[in-house]
Image: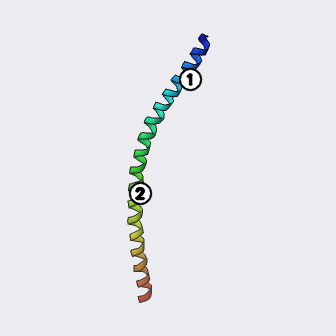
């Protein structure tokens, strides 16, 4: 009987420890991911605008030349 109590107790303790580690890791990881994503999206928007501006300059330079 003691072996079954130890087995069930170990399973429950292992599950709780795994849940705590996952919760702490993913909670921090998701917040950092969202911050990085927002920064990268703003960089993409800025570079897209710069790219369009340079394309227009190139087109106007070709038309003049």
Screen quadrant of the N terminus = top right
Image position of 52 (left or right of 18): left
From the image, which quarter does the C terminus lie in? Answer: bottom left
Q: How is the model colour-coded?
A: rainbow
Q: Earlier in the sequence, mark 2 or mark 1?
A: 1
Q: Nearer the viewer, residue 61 or 15?
A: 15
Secondary element type, mark 2:
helix
Q: Is residue 65 above or below residue 19?
A: below
Work out how far the residue at label 2 is from the one at label 1, CA to CA, in angstroms: 42 Å
Tell me residue 57's x, y (percent): 39, 79
Residue 37 visible in rendering: yes
Secondary structure state at the residue bearing disc 1: helix
Callout 1: few (<14), some (14-19), or many (20+) C-alpha neighbours within 10 Å? few
Q: Is 60 rendered above or below residue 9?
A: below
**Residue shown at the point (55%, 20%) measured from the top left:** 10
In the rendered structure, are the residues bearing label 2 and label 1 in contact, judged by CB atoms less than 8 Å apart? no
Q: Which quadrant holds residue 31?
A: top left
Determine crowd level at label 2: few under 14, some 14-19, many 20+ residues with C-alpha closer than 10 A.
Answer: few
Residue found at x 49% / y 27%: 16
Q: Residue at x 45, y 36 (%)?
A: 23
Residue shown at the point (42%, 74%) measured from the top left: 52
> Would residue 65 be visible to someone looking at this image?
no
Would you name the residue on which mark 2 appears? 40
Q: Is residue 60 above or below residue 17?
A: below
Instruction: Give coordinates of residue 46: x percent, y percent.
Output: 38, 65
Which residue in the protein does label 1 denote? 11
């Amino acid at each position: 009987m003691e072996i079954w109590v130890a087995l069930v107790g170990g399973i429950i303790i292992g599950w709780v420890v795994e849940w705590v580690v996952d919760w702490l890791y993913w909670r921090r990881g998701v917040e950092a991911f969202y911050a990085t994503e927002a920064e990268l999206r703003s960089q993409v928007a800025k570079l897209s605008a710069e790219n369009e501006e340079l394309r227009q300059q190139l087109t106007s330079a070709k038309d003049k030349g």
